[in-house]
Amino acid sequence: MSALESEIDPDATPEPKLQISHLDAYFNDRHVVRDITLSVPQRRVTAIIGPSGCGKSTFLRCLNRMHEHVPGARARGAVMLDGVDVYHPSINPARLRRHVGMVFQKPNPFPTMSIRDNVLAGHRLNGTHVDAPGELVERCLRQVALWDEVKDRLGRPGVSLSSGQQQRLCMARVLAVEPEVILLDEPSSALDPIATAHIEELIEELKERYTLVLVTHNLQQAARVSDYMAFFYLGNLVEFDRTDVIFTNPKESRTEDYLTGKFG
Amino acid sequence: MSALESEIDPDATPEPKLQISHLDAYFNDRHVVRDITLSVPQRRVTAIIGPSGCGKSTFLRCLNRMHEHVPGARARGAVMLDGVDVYHPSINPARLRRHVGMVFQKPNPFPTMSIRDNVLAGHRLNGTHVDAPGELVERCLRQVALWDEVKDRLGRPGVSLSSGQQQRLCMARVLAVEPEVILLDEPSSALDPIATAHIEELIEELKERYTLVLVTHNLQQAARVSDYMAFFYLGNLVEFDRTDVIFTNPKESRTEDYLTGKFG
Amino acid sequence: MKRDLAAELRRPSALSERAGKLVFSLCAAASLVTTGGIVAVLLHQTIGFLQAVPFTRLLTDTHWTPLFAEPRFGLWPLLCGTLLTTGIAMMVAIPCGVLAAIYLSELAGERQRRIVKPLVELLAGIPTLIYGYFALSLVTPALQQIIPGLSGFNALSAGSVMGLMLLPVVASLSEDALSAVPTGLREASHALGVRRTATIFRVVIPSASPGIAAAVLLAASRALGATMIVAIAAGQQPQLTLDPRDSVETMTTYIAQVSLGDIPTGTLEYRTIFAVGLCLFMMTLVLNVIAHRLRRRIHRQERP
Amino acid sequence: GRPGGGAVVTADGSSTLYPLSEAVAEDLQRAHPTTRVTVGISGTDGGLQKLCAGDVDICAASRTIRPTEAQACDRAGITYVELPVAFDGIALVANRKNTWADHLTTAELRRIWEPAAEGRVSRWSDVRPGWPERPLRLFGAGVDSGTYDHFTHAIVGRMHASRSDYTSSEDDNLLVTGVTGDELALGFVGYAYHEQNRDRLKLIPIDDGDPSNGAGAISPTPDTITRGTYQPLSRLLFLYVSRRSLARPEVDSFVTFYLQHAADLAREVGLIPLPESAYTRARARVTSPTE
Amino acid sequence: MSAPVSGLPPDLPSAPASGRSSASSDDLRAPTAGAPVEQAFHAIGFLALLLPLLAFLVLFVSVLADAWPRLGWGFLSGIPSRKPQLAGILPALVGSASLMGLTALIAVPVGIGAAIYLEEYARRSRLTSLIELNISNLAGVPSIIYGLLGLEVFVRAMHLGRSLLAGALTLSLLLLPMVIMTSREALRSVPLSVREACHGLGADRFCMLRLVILPMCFPRMLTGIILALARAIGETAPLLTIGALTYVAFLPDSVHSAFSTLPLQIFAWISRPQTSFHENAAAGIVVLLAVMLLMNGFALWLRARLQRRLPG
Ligand SMILES: Nc1ncnc2c1ncn2[C@@H]1O[C@H](COP(=O)(O)OP(=O)(O)OP(=O)(O)O)[C@@H](O)[C@H]1O
Ligand SMILES: Nc1ncnc2c1ncn2[C@@H]1O[C@H](COP(=O)(O)OP(=O)(O)OP(=O)(O)O)[C@@H](O)[C@H]1O
Ligand SMILES: [Mg+2]
Ligand SMILES: [Mg+2]
Ligand SMILES: O=P([O-])([O-])[O-]
């Protein structure tokens, strides 16, 4: 782990994992994401911030084509995952989502499943075979630092956990399908401060192996965990830069106004 | 208007319009507002802030006895409006509410009524006579800066407006019954930033003539529009003071923690 | 490596995915086939019927005696019987049903509602046959005490018991419509200092009116199609009358009566029941479609 | 395929004979629980049509088969055997509260039921002056029933000619219910239905004006019906059994059981049994392969 | 908690302002017009609600009183008879049960399939809204019309005769829209967040249905279907129309067998004028109501039980 960590040089320019170009998204005739062009760097945390309703969630959901599940929703533009355009007609969106996983605002473990089955749910739902399910469960639960808390009650329902634990279980569930990118939509906004701290730690650890995109309302959180930051306003990308640069030296006045609480 | 404005000296000590003492509120056995004692100053904006579920809305709804409409809800204590205890058995709560109006989080114009009828709804539904309804409609819609936008379509249904306009229509509807106090429960949280800005302007103007109590989640908003601020936590009033004092020099550490985003 | 990813992302879904969709869509098609079947069967026989009996005779004749030696095919007596029993039923069901719904949704306490609502729904599910027994063995004798000379089979008894049967239907559907009115509207009204009755009648009911109208239409559609009550208690004599004390024959009774007699296929008598059936189907179709539209309107209102 | 599978005996037809057929089916079922008999009521017309279509094994009839019906059977290749099983009289009944109608003459009956009466004879006073000026509500057999054929033939004089503004049903039960519930009612039903509801109906004697049958009005009784003095509404009831079905043992045993117990059961349900010799002859007909 | 804070900002006088009060206490005390109207309305509404409940109570008590002498084991285990005291409902009871079983076997899979298609697969389009309109109309088509359809298609065209199968096919068409509607409601009760979680894991729709959605909505679905069946069990008109009203004193032994059902037997008894048969009809009604209540109760119990096992 520490060997890996030392590999990441904060100043080195990372390769892009996802390249978004001219992405537009609509709900029926409502244009909510407008012409976004952005490269998400590999093995970094990219935070997306902006006032409520500015299109952060919609943008995020375009990245793994979850957006199109909403009736009347439409997207246009290109999203390249390692150079493959995920919007190409030949792409199977279900397969794509196994590479680009997602964690939601509200913890949503499957209520009919035990903790163990929740972790394995991705494989079950994809119909893929797991060689050593026990090991996989343990590994994923350890990754989200939940193993010690639940190892004695893996057969209990996933919803019997506290909401902080549930959210970590949901992250373990995503990790189990071994995605390369993880999208997080306000993963801690429904949690108490202690659970939030847990999630943040986890994000820090995960970025050693995964590319993370995090939508958050909490500027402090964005400052704490992200390497890069994108500021959205009314569907537009106003500014995208390294987090420290954005906080210390934003180029756009609207970014500064937002960060200092003049609006939002 | 400007004459009125100049009358208000921000440093002058305002008289109390509402005096709440030892107010408790319950949902069945759940004690959600605990022994609140507080004076709401006249012709000022008093903001109520606090984390979700701390009892802000419930407290607000106790002030015009809307709380008792919820099945199983109970309140105890005294709320004095200009020295009259509104919880006295002889008080008619319907009459009280014509003096203490309320605006809700979700814009809720009456869907079966036109814009004009929505403004007049208070009078029509109460069966009170209006001398010059046309003038009243115009005056109220002007007050909420909606007149120019809707004057050509007063006969259209109120729900045909955008949600920001709907919310202003709801405020006009309250103004039409000429209350003295207006309670606002997160009036802009369902609105986009531009509509929010409109509502905030409106609040600024209204405080010249009305006493306003505003529940909001948005600290920036509270800072921008309120003169006084009450911080609630778990049903208790933690701190109540002038807004500038609270932001610059809070007495309680919990207030400070909340304002700096440590929790909530 | 990148080519691998592209290939991986392009792999199609499992077979079960596509097969499932096909099977499920076939199931959904079954409902269309049912309607198609109903229309085809009714139309086919009705066309055969209309070839023998011109349509104008249905509308101009005032007698319905298709089985007799000199058959006459005026639809009016059956229509009259049907509309009479339906009308009486609606006169009982609408006011009581809507009032009960208002009470349940706006005035009753939480606990009262929790107990009574399922009970009302249970009543709505009681077989019509049982109400028929009720009409014949209890209501008619009671009415005969009040109205001397009332015949043993009569529209009044059948209609009023049908109204009683539909009352829970109207109440339950109207209650759904009333409780779908957002609480926000009631609160807005209360916050303007409006008293309760005014809030109910001028804010809540107008907002729920499409749903209440749908409830009424659905109940009317049920009344038109109700068979057992009228077959048991209203009689079997097609008469052009609007006197509720008379014995009448409804469209459904006629179909039931003839099919009990089991008339052989292909005869004109056999075809009459399909012609009457088509007429009944069209009447209920119109009511059902309007009710469906109205109810969709509520759902759409709820969403934003 | 045939309804009800192979082992079921299906009987249908006359409602007049239904009480007897039902009683036979029930007793056979109790005696031999493995037998399976269904009995329906389609009226004589409906039953004969079904018999000739091969839909049922046995048809009960309250009249003899008509030439047109026999031809239909021929065309379908169905041969049948006709078995008389009981006497019946069509009973004229009114409500128990009816105090005025002591008897009716055949002429009055004709005036009530002929086609020309429709819309004209609508009050009791139209039938006989002095009777109440109140509505006359009529109940009678449906046009598919043998009873209707016989009644119109005997009273109106022309088969299938009658007024149509009355409550008509193939099911005599419904007619009895109607007459029971209506003090202004007049109806005609099979004798058995009167017998089963004696305490609820008022029987109206008929004066046929023929002194050879006895003077004055005559009520239907087992005696007047058997001797043929209850005129013109006495008649014979038949079973028509498909020969092809008779080849099946269960049908054969049902018919045998029927003929064995018809006399007793007819008495029980209110029909009038034939002399014993008639049943013996009928049994002989069943077993004889020719005819 | 800490000591209650003073509710007064430091610069606010605590005494109520005098003279400037504009909310006169008289105005606040004035009664609103129409309080008696409100009370009268309350009473009328209550009566309107009480009316059907009372009527049903009267019905039930009178039926029970009529039925009392007949209710017993002999009634449940006997065959229909011309002698009312001997008559029983066993063939009708078994007939109803087999008919319902067969009907459920046909209608439930198709209905759930259709519901799944509409909720999970169909995109909003003209066709789907047509199907929706069609289903809601079918739910309101008079049951006797289904009888006509069954008569022409199953009894005549398919030569099934008046068999159990013909009856079950007819009733299953009648039941289908109800099953579809209650299944759709059940499917809709699965929160969006769960579906999103599945999609987020790259689930195939079919696996998602099988592993997540159906297990979650199973209790509701089952409850709804049992309630729909409880309604269908009282259906009489369509069976009359396909000609099933005959004297049947034996138990059905195959899907081609002739049959009787509880409502048909009750109807046959109601049609008889003799009061002693009306007592049988009343007893039959008590049994039918008991079956319905049992099914309703069972459905509620099942829901409570299955939902308890299914937290969240
Ligand atoms: N299902 C939908 N149908 C129609 N419009 C929608 C839908 N979901 C979101 N929108 C609209 O799209 C815009 C962008 O929404 P989105 O959820 O992406 O914003 P967001 O930045 O994530 O906001 P938040 O911080 O509140 O989550 C908003 O104006 C919203 O009202
Ligand atoms: N109708 C109700 N029945 C029972 N409990 C309720 C009800 N409404 C609110 N509560 C509870 O009362 C407490 C206070 O609720 P209240 O709505 O006043 O909080 P709030 O501060 O306004 O929260 P928010 O910021 O989310 O609006 C909460 O814990 C809530 O769960
Ligand atoms: Mg969002
Ligand atoms: Mg609140
Ligand atoms: O005996 P019938 O039913 O044919 O009159």
Image (cartoon, coloured by chain):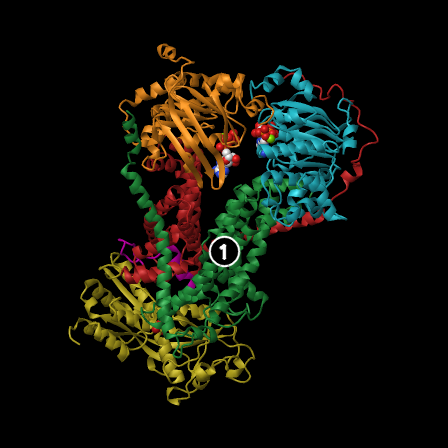
Chain colours: A orange, B cyan, C green, D yellow, E red
Please name whichever residue, E286 or D206, is drawn nearer the observer in this view of the structure: E286
D56 sits to left or right of D114 = left
Q: Which residues are magenta?
A: E249-276
Extreme residue in the right direction: E19
Residue E25 % position (x, y): 79, 36
Q: Is residue B260 above or below residue E123?
A: above
Of helix, strand and loop, which one carries label 1? helix
Please name whichever residue, D65 or E39, is drawn nearer the observer in this view of the structure: E39
Q: Is residue B136 above or below residue C166?
A: above
Q: Which image quadrant is residue C51 in?
A: bottom left
Q: Is residue C192 above or below residue C157?
A: above
The residue where tag 1 is placed is C290
Does the magenta run of residues contain E267?
Answer: yes
Residue D175 % position (x, y): 43, 70
Q: Is residue E13 above or below residue E65?
A: above
Q: Which image quadrant is residue D243 in?
A: bottom left
